[in-house]
């Protein structure tokens, strides 16, 4: 059935530019200066609204049946203004097909990082037994879902690897090279040491949880970046926030900003527990913490749109362009006192926060 032409008038980009956007049959048909678009059957006043390409959260856990790291796709996707989510290693080769099938009833776009352990997060020490890393099964999974699996995930912290140390990452490196895919590496408590992890990473690989406040982090006692971190960034390794329950510190974030170590992508590491009880709540809430830290709105939005889309090698998801499928998020920035809590329990009060209002994805507008 032919859909109505919908025109949003006087919405603003994150840089403050006021525009009109027209969408018809799920396709962007006009992007003009405010007040210049032709009328449609449905004309909406977007005054007070911002618009960006659809938000992308590159680190979530969206396999609902897993506990504790699981949630419903649309609860953490379109329901929070997020058009595309990347499940970050909930499933290994054993169950990646189940995760792929779960997309069928969802409105949100879903992509996945394959856990290098075949059991995925069925256990939270999934890399403590090298017998759970099956290269042949992983290769077959990637071949079976080439448009779904966008990389590998390795959780390199002591509670996950136990006595296996750095070896799971060495194996993951060989797998990623064989498959021509990037690795997202979760960093946390040692062992292994961060100084042993970073040298194994290459261009387009990702360090997630880069702003954690644990002792085994990317900055020295004076808040200066480790030499291995500078070398990794120079090689093209990307820094991702991956807030999560235990992996974001205001103090570490301030040290990183002061030393010029900026985020490439902002992600939530959201799942049911930290969505309902905090400190994550939503991608918008995590983004708002970076406004509190003094980053411009345009930089924050780019981290969940343009830069995320480029890492996924899907630049069309990060732009607003006539002829493209409509992949848009509408949001406001409310100027009111808001409390923010980091993963260390430190509370700070900001004077503004981002609030998602709606998303267009897969030909549908979903109000938040």
Image: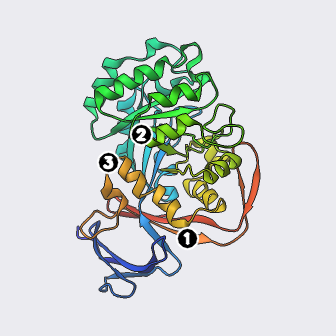
Q: Nearer the viewer, mark 2 or mark 3?
A: 2
Q: Residues within 10 Å of mark 1 (few under 14, many from 20)?
A: some
Using residue 14 as the reference point, say whether residue 338 is left or right of it.
right
Location of the N terminus (image quadrant): bottom left
What secondary structure is found at the residue carrying circle 2? helix
Q: CA distance from mark 3 to mark 1?
A: 28 Å
Q: Is residue 268 left or right of residue 42?
A: right
Q: Earlier in the sequence, mark 3 or mark 1?
A: 3
Q: Which marked residue is nearer to the observer: mark 3 or mark 1?
A: 3
Q: CA distance from mark 1 to mark 2?
A: 36 Å
Q: Identify which residue is drawn at 56% across, 49% down.
A: 261
- Image spot of residue 111 (x, y percent): 38, 43
Of mark 2 and mark 3, the one earlier in the sequence is: 2
- What residue is disc 3 on? 313
Q: Nearer the viewer, residue 64 or 141?
A: 141
Name the spot of residue 286 as percent of width and height, x first. Answer: 60, 54
Mark 3 secondary-structure assignment: loop
Give the answer, above or below, for where 17 lies relative to 280: below
Q: How many dots with numbers?
A: 3
Element under disc 1: strand
Q: For the residues carrying marks 1 and 2, which lies nearer the camera in this image?
A: 2
Q: Earlier in the sequence, mark 1 or mark 2?
A: 2
Q: Residue 42 placed where, x, y %?
A: 36, 80
Residue that label 2 marks: 235
Q: Residue at x 71, y 37 (%)?
A: 221
Residue matched to label 1: 332
Residue 149 visible in rendering: yes
- Label 3: how many Cα within 10 Å (few below 14, some 14–19, many 20+): few
Camera-nearest residue between 134 and 93 = 134
């Amino acid at each position: 059935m032919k859909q109505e032409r919908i025109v949003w008038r006087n919405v603003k980009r994150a840089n403050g530019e006021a525009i009109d956007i027209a969408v018809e049959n799920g396709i962007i048909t006009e992007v003009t200066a405010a007040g210049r678009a032709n009328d449609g059957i449905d004309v909406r006043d977007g005054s007070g609204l911002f618009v960006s390409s659809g938000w992308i959260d590159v680190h979530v856990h969206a396999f609902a049946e897993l506990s504790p790291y699981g949630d419903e796709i649309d609860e953490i996707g379109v329901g929070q203004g997020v058009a595309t989510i990347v499940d970050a290693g909930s499933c290994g080769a054993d169950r990646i097909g189940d995760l792929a099938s779960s997309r069928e009833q969802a409105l949100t776009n879903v992509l996945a990082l394959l856990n290098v352990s075949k059991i995925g997060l069925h256990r939270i020490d999934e890399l403590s037994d090298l017998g759970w890393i099956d290269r042949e099964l992983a290769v077959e999974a990637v071949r079976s879902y080439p448009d779904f699996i966008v990389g590998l995930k390795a959780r390199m912290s002591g509670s996950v690897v136990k006595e296996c140390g750095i070896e799971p990452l060495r194996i993951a490196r060989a797998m990623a090279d064989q498959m021509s895919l990037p690795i997202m590496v979760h960093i946390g408590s040692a062992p292994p040491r961060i100084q042993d992890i970073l040298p194994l990473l290459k261009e387009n690989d990702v360090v997630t949880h880069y702003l954690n406040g644990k002792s085994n982090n990317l900055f020295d006692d004076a808040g200066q970046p480790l030499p291995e971190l500078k070398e990794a960034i120079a090689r093209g390794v990307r820094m991702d926030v991956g807030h999560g329950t235990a992996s974001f510190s205001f103090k570490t974030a301030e040290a990183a900003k002061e030393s010029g170590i900026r985020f490439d992508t902002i992600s939530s590491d959201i799942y049911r527990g930290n969505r309902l009880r905090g400190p994550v709540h939503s991608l918008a809430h995590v983004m708002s913490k970076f406004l509190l830290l003094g980053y411009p709105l345009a930089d924050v939005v780019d981290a969940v749109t343009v830069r995320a889309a480029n890492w996924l090698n899907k630049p069309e998801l990060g732009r607003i362009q006539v002829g493209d499928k409509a992949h848009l998020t509408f949001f406001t920035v409310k100027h009111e006192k808001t409390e923010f809590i980091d993963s260390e329990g430190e509370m700070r009060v900001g004077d503004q926060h981002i609030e998602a209002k709606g998303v267009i994805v897969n030909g549908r507008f979903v109000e938040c």
